Amino acid sequence: MNLTQDLGVWLAALLTLFVFSFLYKDNPLYKFAEHLFVGVSAGYYIVLNVWTVVVPNLWDPLVRTFTGRDPVTNAVVTQAGGPFNASVGDYRAWFLIPALLGVLLFSRLVSRIEWVSRWALAMIIGVYAGLKTTGFAQGDLVAQVQASMQPLWTPDVWTGVNAILFTIGLLTSLLFFFYSREHKGALGVLARTGTVFLMVSFGAGYGYTVMSRLSLLIGRFQFLLEDWLGMK
Amino acid sequence: MKRELPLLLTAVIGLFMILSFYVPHHLVSVPADFLQQCAVIVVAFGYVLGGANALRVNLDGIARRQPDWQYKLVLVVSLVGTVVVGLAEGRHWQDKSSVSMFLYNQIYSPMQATMFALLAFFIASAAFRAFRIRTVEAGMLAVAALIVMLGRVPIGNEMTSWLPESIRLGSLQEWIMNVPQNAAKRAILIGAAMGVMATGLRVILGIERSYLGGGD
Amino acid sequence: MNLTWLEKLDRRWLFLIVGLLVLGPLLRPIGLPLVPTKPVRQFYEAIEAVPDGAIVLMSCDYDPGGKPETVPMTKTALRQLWDKKCRVVITCLWTGGSGLVDETVESTAEEYRASGKTLVYGKDYVNLGFKAGYEAVMVLMGKGIGNAFPQDHRANPTASLPLMREVRDYSSFALLVNISAGYPGTKEWVQQVNSRFHLPMVSGCTAVSAPEYYPYLQSGQLRGLLGGMAGAAEYEKLRNEKGSATEGMDAQSLAHVFVALCILMGNVVQWTKRRGAGA
């Protein structure tokens, strides 16, 4: 065993053990670690978004437009056509619009004027509704239906059997979600067949979830053993 | 008008974004690109708002001396401290030797990883106490889960190494993932895609208004 | 057989057993053999098929919560790409992930250089860092990578980096390697980038997401898939490397057996209790 001399690693290891102490029972050490984590992560998210989005994507272009100088190097920047002459990627003074919308978002902190934030929300919802609708339509609906049209009669028997089974599973699982008619008679039989496939997929999903969660524990133990205790 | 104008804005922008998927002309693509830039910036403001709200709620809790207010003080101090340090360090705040990166690497990163690692213990406990096979369907779920769990790791093939390769746990697991599981997941994908498209259109057309919140 | 004591068992005993079963093989490895599965081999072959020297986009969409699964995949993929002299542009769309991604990339680059190979930041690889906006960023990059990322992770102007002068939009890349832990991640890249801009892609993801990406693999939208720590370990095996994923598989195996036993024993206890009540 070769304990690390790095104070940072000691801090990380102690906080890790504080969080693990919750497994015995809830205690002040765990509560302290939990609140410290929430505080640091909230602060980190604020700083990250300021320096990686607000400054380079909003502040810098506005400074270049209105002062004619680069905000980092202070070199002169010439922008032909004026502040509202936009092209792809170069929106100059038009960035005042997202700046205003971003500031309006903060009205949510004051209940009397929180209706003002609806403008910013409307813009976000409009953009993402549009992107998601076309993304799901092309990537999930069209492409997946296209890929489902596979040959059911193949030279290799097992490939053909699997293809038939796959198609039966797909159609019956889709029929399971058809609620416009009661699941009786032929539809009932097909829906119950779909249930079999769905249960198998949920079981597979559970198995993979178990694998994922245990991997996370393995990772923490690897950190404690290798980085903290130096047992490698 | 406090609700109608935002609804109109959502409709116009949403329809424009859908149009931009089909029309490459610069009269459509340039404004669409600008709207995406706006979304990126406003989402970033949203994160800042979230942090500010966390600060407000916890400051309120400290002022009212709510239960565990001392821990809320820890939260507020660490939040403010992280923000002050990060903003003070400037554009190079993510350099290896910065205080911000120390806070990230030695506080945020290990604790987030450990919070998720706790789930491993709870999943084992839940498997023993809550996983009950009371119906045929639950039995199918359990059998699939057991085959996949054991077949996906090396011990599954070792345990069944005496069997022909095609019926070892690893091969059974692969077959389950490629055929029945795949079929059901594809059905869910297709169904979910139709649901998202319907919801997206409802939002764009103003039928779905819950995102505006209550009030006038 | 009276198993009612099992029903009343304090769950903390189960926690202890899980902890010991994970700790044991980490201290004393068993060495269970790994057999790479087809999706992993497809992932490996898709990267091998990229022309040497091509530019590849790698989006590392994860945070420390998925570290043990995603970091080994990232490291192995970077080494495979750099062995082929591919130039790599790295991005991160997860708020909590950019620090971890940078640390992973830089530590892999340092190990690579320590083995005597040349690797220059800005020329062989660039880390563009984090950008908020989820799908909007993905589509924004389609009109110009530099438009979405005016500066890199180190606050260098993107236009000043030699590699980025050769990158315009998605057409500049031969492949998208997406390592993801959830949303935004593989699903969104498939929907917004693979479907719209037809950029070929492979995915490495946490095990909890892997089952829902099998349809994308079967349809060809994904050319390869690594699922969880097992996928990462099999990928290391294909590369003849022994990383943290391989080292964790013995512990994973024993823990899985225990969870399987928990499911069976929990139900046996219930059945014997119901039979006892019925008798």
Image: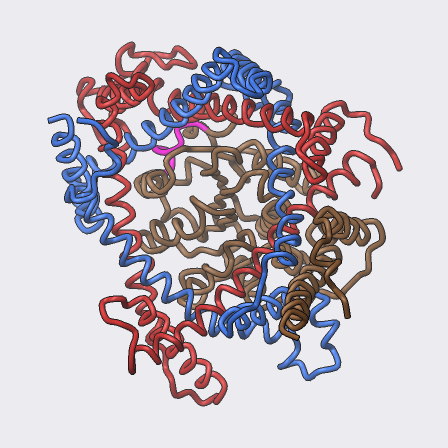
Chain colours: A red, B blue, C brown
Of residues A172 and A228, the one nearer the viewer is A172
Residue situated furthest right in the rendering: A1
The percent position of residue A196, horizontal first and vertical second, equals 45, 74
Image point (25%, 27%), residue name: A120
Q: Quadrant of residue B159?
A: bottom right
As drawn, B163 above or below C205: below
Quadrant placement of the C terminus of chain C? bottom right
Give the x, y percent position of residue C93.
45, 38
Q: Which of C19 and A219 lies nearest the eye of the viewer?
A: C19
Find residue B132 and report its horizontal and vertical position in percent: 58, 64
Tell me where the magenta segment starts and ends, as one range.
C145-151
Q: Locate the N terminus of chain C and report the quarter of the image it occupies.
A: bottom right
Is C147 one of the magenta-colored residues? yes
Quarter of the image where one finds residue C135: top left
Q: Please, is residue A86 above or below residue A137 in the view?
A: above
Q: Is residue C68 magenta?
A: no
